[in-house]
Image (cartoon, rainbow, N blue to C red):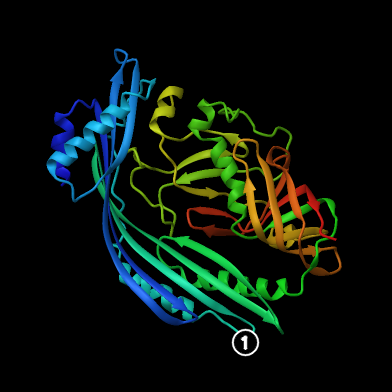
């Protein structure tokens, strides 16, 4: 199929192309409590093609992409390619070059054993400690082995494989006639059983505390600690501000070599893009456009060192030797967890939704469960919301030395922002 598609593309009027052929073998299990309700195996192939067309005497470049189904005949493939070329002629961007072959190495990872990954997840879920009042309602396990083959018209031709997994869990907690549910979704490469059990045990505790939570007090401005995966949204803001597309489009005014928050107090952020992050679902040898991935420092002590992103925007900005980053490692801060959890503060573990706007930096989230530390006692609280802006918080934020991984982000286990607006529920 790929050879047939290649021949058609080379004989077409396209001035360039990229093919991404991904084959996925997946095992899926659906449990009610710990009783297997159903399971299935998926073995699928997705072939995505992007064609390029030079326009206006080569000053502009158009592009269009779509999926070519493996079941298509040769004539049907030709027809789909012609449609893509026609669409590409209606898109005009300043010309840029596609990625060319470069020195890269194929990761020497062990072959992915998808059945073993699924088995490890099942065993981990069965070993989660439960009680009569805090227990697992249901869960679904998705374990995948992916083989990706990337080819482009410049001569790149590379194949690599990687695991990708997901677990969806619903936990229940009850007290008398009052019962609540909490939902979690965990993404990873393969199964880290100990970390998964730790996270679900935490959620069971959160469910128990949610039943006795008091209304969140009106705190005005307060320190807020983020101990869960919601903190990933905070560090994603730093990531997006260094995206070449954001820089080119003027969504970010950050500059290489210029401190993002001069005279900042507290901890400064050092963020690295890494090729391999243990147990990440995004350990790739090349990015989606065929650029080789390697370790690089993006931000060092609040100072951008380079920008990353797609080939088009890197070409416009004159950025060489970069790529679409996938895994991120944020250096730990200066404080221990005990020091982060000092004084009066609100620790939020459950939001109805938490967002950090990648352009403005505005943060917002409705509190479903938090712990208010008033210096003498700790009170579970619920209701109200938090708000503010990262451009202000980056001037004084604190991070724990201890770290924690959430799929493709390895970040400080605790992040503390000062002077956050807290609207109470009282």
- Where is residue 360 shown, x and y percent of the image? 65, 36
In this rendering, position of residue 395 left or right of residue 323: right
Q: Residue furthest top?
A: 57
In this rendering, position of residue 291 left or right of residue 425: left
Q: Is residue 314 above or below residue 29?
A: above
Q: Is residue 263 above or below residue 48?
A: above
Report the residue at 55% width, 44% height from top. 271
> 34 or 275: nearer the eye?
34
The answer to which quarter of the image holds residue 383 is bottom right
Q: Which residue is mark 1?
A: 132
Whether residue 155 can be seen here: no
Give the secondary structure at mark 1.
Answer: loop
Q: Where does the C terminus fall, quadrant-wise?
A: bottom right
Report the residue at 54% width, 35% height from top. 242
Report the residue at 42% width, 39% height from top. 324
The answer to which quarter of the image holds residue 99 is top left
- Where is residue 319 shown, x and y percent of the image? 43, 27
- Where is residue 47 shown, x and y percent of the image? 26, 46
- Where is residue 305 shown, x and y percent of the image? 53, 33
Q: Is residue 202 above or below residue 144?
A: below
Report the residue at 53% width, 31% height from top. 246
The answer to which quarter of the image holds residue 75 is top left
Whether residue 66 can be seen here: yes
In this rendering, position of residue 95 left or right of residue 392: left
Q: Residues within 10 Å of mark 1 (few under 14, many from 20)?
A: few
> 203 or 180: nearer the eye?
180
> 291 or 294: nearer the eye?
291
Count of numbered marks: 1
Q: Residue furthest bottom?
A: 132
């Amino acid at each position: 199929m790929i050879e047939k598609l290649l021949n058609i593309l080379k004989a077409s009027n396209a001035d360039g192309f990229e093919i991404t052929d991904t084959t996925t073998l997946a095992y899926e299990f659906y449990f009610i409590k710990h009783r297997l309700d159903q399971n299935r195996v998926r073995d699928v192939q997705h072939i995505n093609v992007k064609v390029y067309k030079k326009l206006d005497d080569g000053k502009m470049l158009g592009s269009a992409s779509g999926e070519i189904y493996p079941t298509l005949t040769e004539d049907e493939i030709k027809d789909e390619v012609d449609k893509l070329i026609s669409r590409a002629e209606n898109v005009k961007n300043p010309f840029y070059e596609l990625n060319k072959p470069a020195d890269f190495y194929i990761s020497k990872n062990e072959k992915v054993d998808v059945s073993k990954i699924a088995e490890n997840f099942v065993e981990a879920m069965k070993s989660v400690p439960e009680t009569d009042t805090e227990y697992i309602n249901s869960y679904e396990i998705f374990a995948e082995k992916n083989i990706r083959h990337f080819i482009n018209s410049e001569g790149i031709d590379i194949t690599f494989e990687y695991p990708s997994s997901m677990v969806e869990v619903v936990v229940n907690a009850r007290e008398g006639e009052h019962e609540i549910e909490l939902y979690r979704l965990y993404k990873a490469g393969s199964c880290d059983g100990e970390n998964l059990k730790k996270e679900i045990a935490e959620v069971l505790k959160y469910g128990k505390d949610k039943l006795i939570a008091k209304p969140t007090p009106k705190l005005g401005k307060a320190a807020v600690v983020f101990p869960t995966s919601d903190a990933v949204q905070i560090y994603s803001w730093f990531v997006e501000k260094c995206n070449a597309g954001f820089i080119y489009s003027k969504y970010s005014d950050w500059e290489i070599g210029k401190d993002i928050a001069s005279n900042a107090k507290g901890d400064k952020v050092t963020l690295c893009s890494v090729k391999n992050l243990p147990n990440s679902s995004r350990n790739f040898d090349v990015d989606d456009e065929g650029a080789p991935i390697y370790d690089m420092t993006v931000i060092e002590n609040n100072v951008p060192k380079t920008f990353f992103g797609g080939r088009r925007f890197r070409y416009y900005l004159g950025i060489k030797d970069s790529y679409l980053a996938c895994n991120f490692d944020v250096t730990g801060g200066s404080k221990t967890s005990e020091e982060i959890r000092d004084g009066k503060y609100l620790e939020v573990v459950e939001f109805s939704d938490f967002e950090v706007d990648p352009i403005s930096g505005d943060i917002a989230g409705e509190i479903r469960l938090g712990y208010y530390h008033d210096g003498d006692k700790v009170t579970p609280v619920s209701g109200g919301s938090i708000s503010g802006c990262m451009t202000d918080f980056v001037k004084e934020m604190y991070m724990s030395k201890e770290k924690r991984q959430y799929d493709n982000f390895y970040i400080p286990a605790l992040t503390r922002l000062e002077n956050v607006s807290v609207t109470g529920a009282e």
